[in-house]
Image (cartoon, helix red, strand yellow):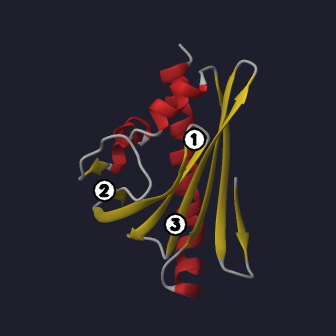
Amino acid sequence: MISYNSDNKTYTLKAKQKLPISMTKSWNFFSTPKNLSKITPSHMNFKILTDFGKMYEGQIIKYKVSPFPFFRVGWTTKITSVEKPFSFTDKQTSGPFRLWEHEHIFEESKDGIYAYDIVNYKLPLGFIGRLFGGQIIKWQLNRIFEYRKKMLNKIFIK
């Protein structure tokens, strides 16, 4: 699910999930920032700090999250592109990663949609960050996306 490119020191997470919903229902759910809290593990104490109306290009979203026990961090992302109802991209402007760019893609199929996530990220602190945090962050992100998959199935596959 997560690969590492040693040339540019970037990790790439790829996830795919089939859901038996329409493109409209998919877009309405995924393009509403407040729904992110429904698919984020509760132990992360995820809170959106900004008003979360419908998504638009240029929108700034501020969060607080606890990626690890007793460690709370602020995180700000900007919606850098929106192609309704097919895709949107958010990019970290400040937060725990050196780079975080998350592309959400929705593709219609004959009996629902495929939701794709492609996340490119770099850890802070260069070699030291990769050495001490690489495996831990990969483990944590895999857990988060597995939880997300489980919750989306619970929400949309009853």
Q: Quadrant of residue 65?
A: bottom left
Query: Is residue 96 toward the left or the right of residue 137 in the image?
Result: left
Residue holding disc 1: 146
Give how far apart the Cα atoms at labels 2 and 1 are.
21 Å
Residue holding disc 3: 100
* Residue 8 locus on image (x, y percent): 69, 81
Q: Residues within 10 Å of mark 1 (few under 14, many from 20)?
A: some
Q: Quadrant of residue 55?
A: top left
Q: Can the viewer see residue 68 in this picture?
A: no
**Label pair 2/1, CB-CB below 8 angstroms:** no
Q: Residue at x 54, y 26 (%)?
A: 24
Residue holding disc 2: 63
Amino acid type of the residue tagged 3 in the rendering: Trp
Dot 2: what SS?
Answer: strand
Q: Residue at x 28, y 49 (%)?
A: 48
Give the mark nearest the N terminus, 2 or 1: 2
Give the mark nearest the N terminus, 2 or 3: 2
Amino acid type of the residue tagged 1 in the rendering: Glu
On screen, residue 157 above or below 87: above
Pick the front one: 150 or 112: 112
